[in-house]
Amino acid sequence: MTSATPPAPGPTRVTRGLFTRIFAWYWIASIAVVGVAVASAALLISRSSIEMARWRVVAHDAAVIHSERAADVLERGGADAVCDFLLRWDVALAAHSYIIDADGKDLCGDTPPAAAAAFVEHIRESGRAEIVQRSGEPTLIGAKLPTRDGKPLVLLRTVAEGQTPPLRPPPRGGPRGGPGGPPGGPRPPRGGPRDGPPGGPLDPPPLGLRPDLPPGIGGPPVIPPLGDVLVQPSVGAVVLLAVAASGAVCYLLARSLSRPVRELQAAVRQLAGGDLSVRVAADIGRRSDEIGALARDFDQMAARLQREMDAQGRLLRDMSHELRSPLARLNVALGIARKQGTGAAAHALDRIERESDALNRLIGDVLTLARWDNGAMNVQTSDIDLAELLRAIVEDADFEARSVGKQVTLTIDSPCSVQADPGLLHSAIENIVRNAVRYTAENSAVEVTLATDPASGSAVIRVRDRGPGVPAQAVAELFRPFYRVSEGRDRDSGGVGLGLAITQRIVQSHGGSVSAENAAGGGLAVEVRIPTGAFAEPRP
């Protein structure tokens, strides 16, 4: 069923679609940025973990090899030789090494860190090389010396926190101090070989993995994959917080972009419905972007339309008032001519009188429509039995229709009462029925039905003819003033396009609605809905 005004797309569906698209695309873009950032961070973490694992492999293997070499140097050259041997490696590895005996003293005369005592004792008991890294403390690397006499000596190597020793061998006969030495400076060199430890320089082992050692302590490095990084509480919380924050920002952005569009759409619908006073610049026009410019252009368009329609209405009212006086004088002259004229002029006088009456009705309709549009019509409501009202209308219309081979039938499904102005409602429904009688085919019937719609609390009056109907594109225009369908519903058929427009105003003044559609099987069906019970607020 087509309503009196052209239907527009539902604002909720259109606005929600625009809001959803804006929100979804911006949020997807934000999530993509967060994803790239997290992936980059995970890659950096993984690379850092790889480097750290590689260093642990080298440091572990170096401690094992150095403990074996230190035991050999100690037996062949004594304490000074082993201290000189370790000194060169300390410079190369940016570390500090100790040879700790069973009493916890360093053979080279240094004082071992007290925090390493338990670690040294653990190495002495387990006999394995191990690495311990704790936040805020130096890294401890320990290995037991495999001495032939079974002395419980332990090689302890410390590396300052945050410092990764270079993965390179010491220079042959390299320096005994200088840059790269342990914190606080290297120990002063003692006697012993100066061209490298016995047996030649000790290169670090290859950077291959040691499957025989635990992961992360000389064995296969622990490289956290992206999934493991994301499930860590700190990283996962940051990711979720970033996604939630981006979602909130995108929601506000999408809402700020779609809200003015929604307001503009509502204003356009009001304008299309006939409210020419609607304006949007007060809320949206203050924006400095394209939407604000569109709002200002809309207000200019609405203002111009309102001026044009007001001018047109004034012109019609003025012309109608000005024509009333000449028509009244013409009718008086017709009466005088009938009294003084001859029978030969009677036919011409009758024609003049019919045209005068038609013009007078047209002027009356124009003035009535103008009063409806200006809100000057006075609606006096009372309780009306719709069934009785329709019986009276159908009885009169059927009497006239039978004279031209047509008829009008009435079907009452649900009798009901409404609060309405009897004269206005009678005029509105009668106009629809008479139009249907005019256009229905000969030997056919105009069907009038009365029913109720409990869901909406309305009385439903349906009038259907068996005529040619109207083009689909013209259905929505039937209630526009002065609109006429070119085929079959022109001036020759008696219509000037004001009857249905006035009918619409009357029905809307009672809080109802009127609509039309081409009926299945041919003909036009017009449906009137009027709220039952108390008098409803008029529709705009």
Image (cartoon, rainbow, N blue to C red):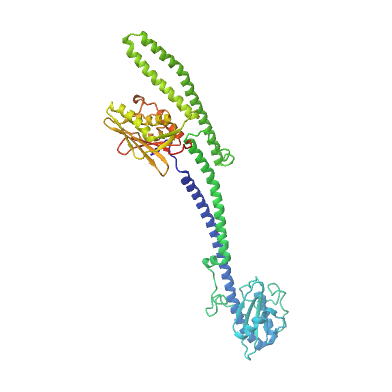
Most extreme residue toward the bottom is 149
Instruction: Quarter of the image for the N terminus: give it.
Output: top left
From the top left corner, tell me how far across and down residue 140 is, in percent: 64, 77
User: 470 or 299: which is nearer to us?
Assistant: 470
Residue 203 makes an appearance in the image: no
Determine which quarter of the picture holds residue 37: bottom right
- Who is closer to the viewer here, 83 or 260? 260
Q: Quadrant of residue 215?
A: bottom right
Camera sees residue 256: yes
Residue 499 picture location, percent across and down: 40, 28
Task: Report x, y in % for residue 414.
Answer: 36, 40
At x 52%, y 29%, the residue is: 307
Q: Is residue 466 above or below residue 105?
A: above
Task: Name which residue lies at 34% across and 13% down.
Answer: 348
Residue 382 in percent (x, y) is at: 45, 33
From the viewer's perspective, is residue 445 above or below residue 58?
above
Instruction: Name the residue rendered at 31%, 10% in the picture.
Output: 344
In the picture, measured across the screen, residue 407 lies left or right of residue 159, that is: left
Depth order, front residue of 267/107: 267
Q: Locate residue 164 relative to residue 208 in the image: left or right.
A: right
Query: For this rendering, which residue is in front, 56 or 503?
Result: 503
> In the rendered image of this protein, does residue 466 appear above or below residue 88?
above
Q: How many callouts does the rendering have?
A: 0
Say whether residue 2 is left or right of residue 187: left
